[in-house]
C-alpha cells in the first residue's frame, strides 16, 4: 500500500470521527494519532486532507448534493459521504490527477463501505469531476 493511500485512509477515518461527533478538528487529530502510528509524510498528507476537507465541508456538501441526483445528503451513508467529501476536496485541490483521485476513492469505498458503494461513488465523482472542469 502506498503512503498516499494510507494517508487517505487515515484522513477518512478522522473525517468519519469528526462527522459523527463534530468535535474540534484539532482534537480529532490529536486523539487519532495517539493510536495510529505513521511516518511523518503520511501523517502530514493525512492532516492536510482532513483539515482541508473539514474547512470546505459546506461547499463540498453542496457539490455532493448537486451531483448525487435523487439523494439527499443526510440519506447518504456517513462513510460514503466522507469519501465523497475527501475526493471532491482532492479534485479541487489537484493533489493528484482526477482519474487517480477517483480510483483512490473507489478503493476506499471497497475497503470501508458496502459492495454497492463503488458504483455510487463513481457516478457522483464522475459528475463532480466534470462539473469542476467546466
Image (cartoon, helix red, strand yellow):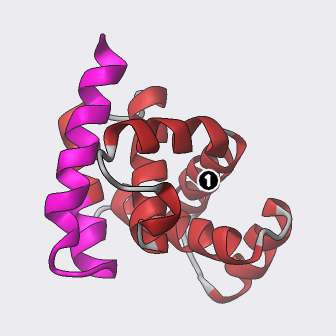
Magenta highlight on residue 82: no
Span highlighted in magenta in the image: 106-134
Q: How many marks?
A: 1
Seen in the image, is 64 located left or right of residue 16? left
Residue 29 on image: x %, y %:
74, 68
The residue under the point 16% across, 80% down is: 115
Quarter assignment of residue 52: top right
Q: Is residue 29 or residue 124 the one in the foreground?
A: 124
Query: Seen in the image, is 10 located left or right of residue 40?
Result: left
State the image coordinates of residue 61 (x, y, percent, origin top left).
54, 45
Q: 70 or 13, which is in the foreground?
A: 70
Question: Dot 1: within a 10 Å radius of its alpha carbon, few (fewer than 14), some, or many (20 or more) residues?
Answer: few
- Residue drawn at point x = 61 percent, y = 70 percent: 14
Taking the image as drawn, is residue 1 in sight?
A: no
Report the magenta stretch's main SS: helix
Q: Is residue 12 above or below residue 63?
A: below
Residue under the image location 42 percent in, 73 percent down: 77
What residue is pinned by disc 1? 44
Across and down, in percent, residue 119 comes to 13, 61
Magenta stretch: includes residue 133: yes
Q: Is residue 33 above or below residue 125?
A: below
User: Residue 107 placed where, x, y %?
Assistant: 22, 65
Callout 1: SS: helix
What's the residue at 53%, 37% (across, down)?
A: 62
Q: Quadrant of the C terminus?
A: top left
Amino acid at each position: 500500500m502506498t503512503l498516499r493511500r494510507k494517508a487517505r485512509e487515515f484522513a477518512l477515518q478522522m473525517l468519519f470521527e469528526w462527522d459523527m461527533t463534530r468535535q474540534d478538528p484539532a482534537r480529532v487529530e490529536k486523539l487519532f494519532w495517539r493510536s495510529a502510528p505513521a511516518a511523518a509524510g503520511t501523517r502530514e498528507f493525512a492532516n492536510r486532507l482532513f483539515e482541508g476537507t473539514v474547512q470546505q465541508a459546506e461547499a463540498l456538501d453542496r457539490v455532493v448534493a448537486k451531483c448525487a441526483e435523487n439523494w439527499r445528503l443526510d440519506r447518504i451513508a456517513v462513510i460514503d459521504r466522507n469519501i465523497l467529501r475527501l475526493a471532491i476536496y482532492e479534485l479541487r485541490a489537484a493533489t493528484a490527477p482526477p482519474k487517480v483521485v477517483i480510483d483512490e476513492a473507489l478503493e476506499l469505498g471497497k475497503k470501508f463501505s458496502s459492495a454497492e458503494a463503488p458504483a455510487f461513488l463513481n457516478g457522483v465523482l464522475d459528475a463532480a469531476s466534470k462539473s469542476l472542469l467546466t
